[in-house]
Amino acid sequence: WAMCNVGADSPEDYGWYFSWGNVGGYVPSEISGLNCKWVSAGTGTELVGGFSVENYSLTPGASLAGDIPANGTYDAVCANWNDGGRMPTGTEFEELINRNNCSWEWVAIGGINGYKVTGKKTGYTDKWIFLPVTGVGGNNYLSYTNAGYYWSKSVGSSYLKTHLYISQDQNTPAVLVDSAGSYGHPVRAVKEK
């Protein structure tokens, strides 16, 4: 697992937000309460209408019927990082969620809440990642709650897109959820061993 999200400079940085299957990252601008404008991380151009269903329907990711292939056309990691990484699968998120594989501790790093996820398997007990609570990007809003959302490359039930959902609930800190691909979520990269 990468130490930070795509577009982030540190583990506690949210990084860029993506709709599912699309490689152009966006960041919130002119935040006022929950309202914000979404601008391109590359050009600064505003995404008028934000992460709306209408905007999503015009993107390459909207027409993708299966899981995201590891290429720069649909995979946000492959397109933005040239280090051999890719978007994680739902199965890889399940391995991360499994309490036999990793421990989950609610902490704040740099004033940002999230989970420090530490490996339990031999050879990984000194390895950890921090998953900050990121909120979710919508039309012209960024909903910040004590929750975080991370896209996988997998398609779930009824062609909905699978993402990791984290919350402050210590009993169930993370689950896999299926939702519409139009929402804006960060992406955390994985790399083959």
Image: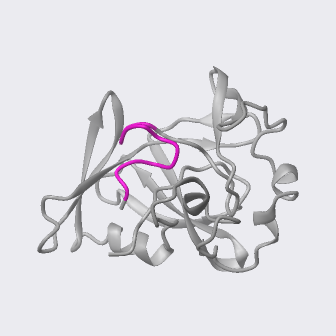
- Depth check: give the residue in front, 25 or 132: 25
Vertical comparison of 103 with 37: above or below = below
Q: Nearer the viewer, residue 8 or 57?
A: 8
Where residue 182 sits, quadrant-wise, is bottom right
Q: Vertical placement of 38 versus 103: above or below?
A: above
**Relative to 104, residue 84 above or below:** below
Image quadrant where residue 32 sits? top right
Query: Above or below — where is 56 with respect to 145?
Result: below
Which of the 4 image quarters holds residue 139?
A: top right
Quadrant the N terminus occupies: bottom left
Magenta range: 2-13
Percent coordinates x, y for residue 24 in the rendering: 69, 49
Q: Main secondary structure of the magenta part?
A: loop
Residue at image x 80%, y 47%?
52
For this view, does 51 lie left or right of residue 80? right
Colouring mode (rainbow / by chain / secondary structure / one colour): one colour
Between 162 and 4, the one nearer to me in the picture: 4
Judge left or right: residue 97 versus residue 185: left
Q: Position of residue 141 (x, y in %)?
A: 69, 34
